Amino acid sequence: MRKTLYLKFILAYILFAFFGFVTVATFVSRLTYEYCLRQTSGNMYREASRIADTYAVDLYNSEISLDTVQKQMEALSYFMDTEIWIINPSGRMVVNSANAPDPEQEIIVEGFDPTVTKESYYTRGTFFNSFEEEKVSVIAPIINNYKTRGYVIIHTAASGIDEEANSMLNISYLMLIVILFLSLIILIFFTEVVYRPLRKIIAATEQYASGNMHYELNVEGEDEMGYLAASLRYMAQTVANSDDDQKKFIANVSHDFRSPLTSIRGFLEAMLDGTIPPEMHEHYLGVVLNETERLTKLTNSLLTLNNLNTKGMLLHMTDWNINDVIRKVSASFEQVCRSKNIRIRLILSGDVLYVHADMDKIQQVLYNLVDNAIKFSGSGSVIEIETTEKGGKVFVSVKDNGIGIPKEDQNQIWERFYKTDLSRGKDKKGTGLGLSIVREIIRAHGENISLVSTQGVGSKFTFTLKRSELNDELDDDDL
Ligand code: ADP
């Protein structure tokens, strides 16, 4: 059987109850008995000493008659529920509260020895065979003129003390039962509050481990269990989403690879079987080359994205002049711009503007943004790249007067493979990966990128970078 937490608790509870009873039955029972014996015999001894110092001394001094003392002792013993004796050192009975001694007939306690109590002030037994049942007896000497004249002895039934001890012990048992009952309540409480939710959580983790991420875990509450369950639910949801994302991603990749491959294959087959005449081959080989370029671009973008995600993006942070890099990037588009009759206008803050970032990656961001701006702009339009500084940040924006991005698409364009319907006609080579790469890079820098766009008017992408402290040193030099 599996050793569950619950079983362990039940076992601990049973052990607790068992040892509780054993302790009460042995240790506590002995302590209680000893306590009762000490209490009773202490009281009896005090009474015996008092009698020895008063009545008994008076009796030996003949200041009071034997009969009076006998009567007094009878009354006292009735009141105390004891038996009181006064005996001579030789053991001869002088007064006996239970049975007045006959002056004619001498009663001797055979073998009487006053040291029988040893260190304590009581003795338990039949008191030199004077009784049939067990008694607890105390002995107090009667001292007159520095001589021991006799002894006052008080007996009480040992069974009386046993009964008293037992009734006290019953209280201990009752307390133990109350404690066990209360701890049972704690056990039940524990079951409801900890054990049951824990079982549910374990069942859920087993389901999650076997891949059923949509299993419903219904443990609610504001306590640690509720928090744990909520975290697990969140984790399962995230894994389920990422599973879905992965499936979507693979479907997109396959689709994007399949269409160029199908068209390449179609053209090549048509050339081979003569459907496309040889004089047209050059034209169609150009189309095929175009398609392979698209495949290369797609593969490169996927590799870049994969590297960005898996390596947790290792950034090579340096201080460099963003204005310079913008100039270089826009220069690399010169040819395309000329062919599309598009002008790039640079509105740069100062001559040099240092930023603290990974130069290669930001260059890629700029490249992707400018590439999009050109792709989605019509002939004769102007693209503006602007840098500004504000509060320790450098703002870089790429603005075009192109087709714009519809409101409903503005959140999705950052997702992998997403393309707006508007753009499909304009850009057949697009992969829909460019902006996800851009967002990953900017996020890895701990910076932001935003978009303002109006359909049919144009778009403006703005991202922030950390301003380098080198700028301040340069300013100081200028002064
Ligand atoms: P790609 O450009 O390769 O298709 P991106 O991730 O760079 O992929 O862009 C995703 C989509 O966002 C584009 O397909 C296009 O629909 C839209 N988009 C991006 N930039 C612009 C822009 N400057 N103007 C209009 N639409 C844009």
Image (cartoon, grey):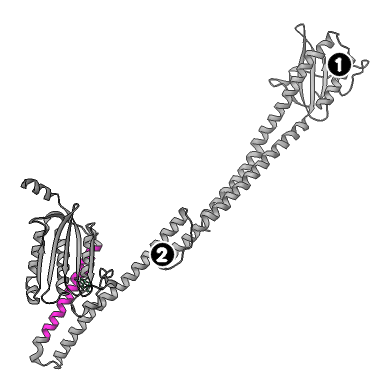
Report which residue position mark 2 lands on. Answer: 209
Q: Secondary structure under badge 1?
A: helix
State whether residue 29 is above or below residue 304.
above
Q: Where is residue 222 drawn, in percent x and y?
A: 47, 54
State whether residue 363 is above or below residue 73.
below
Kindly identify the amino acid type of the residue bearing the numbered disc 2. Answer: Ala
| Residue name at image x 24 percent, y 56 percent | 446
Nearest the camera: 196 or 135? 196
Kindly identify the amino acid type of the residue bearing the numbered disc 1. Answer: Val
Q: Where is residue 253 drawn, in percent x and y?
A: 25, 75
Magenta segment boundaries in residue numbering: 284-309
Cα distance between the residues tagged 2 and 1: 94 Å
What secondary structure is the stretch in magenta mostly built from?
Answer: helix
Please give left or right for residue 391 compared with residue 168 in the image.
left
| Residue name at image x 86 percent, y 16 percent | 69
Nearest the camera: 216 or 429? 429
Q: Secondary structure under badge 2?
A: helix
| Residue name at image x 67 percent, y 41 percent | 173
Q: Where is residue 397 drawn, in percent x and y?
A: 17, 63
Q: Residues within 10 Å of mark 2 (few under 14, many from 20)?
A: few
Residue 69, numbered circle = 1
Q: Where is residue 279 drawn, in percent x and y?
A: 7, 91
Q: Is residue 4 visible?
A: no
| Residue name at image x 72 percent, y 28 percent | 37
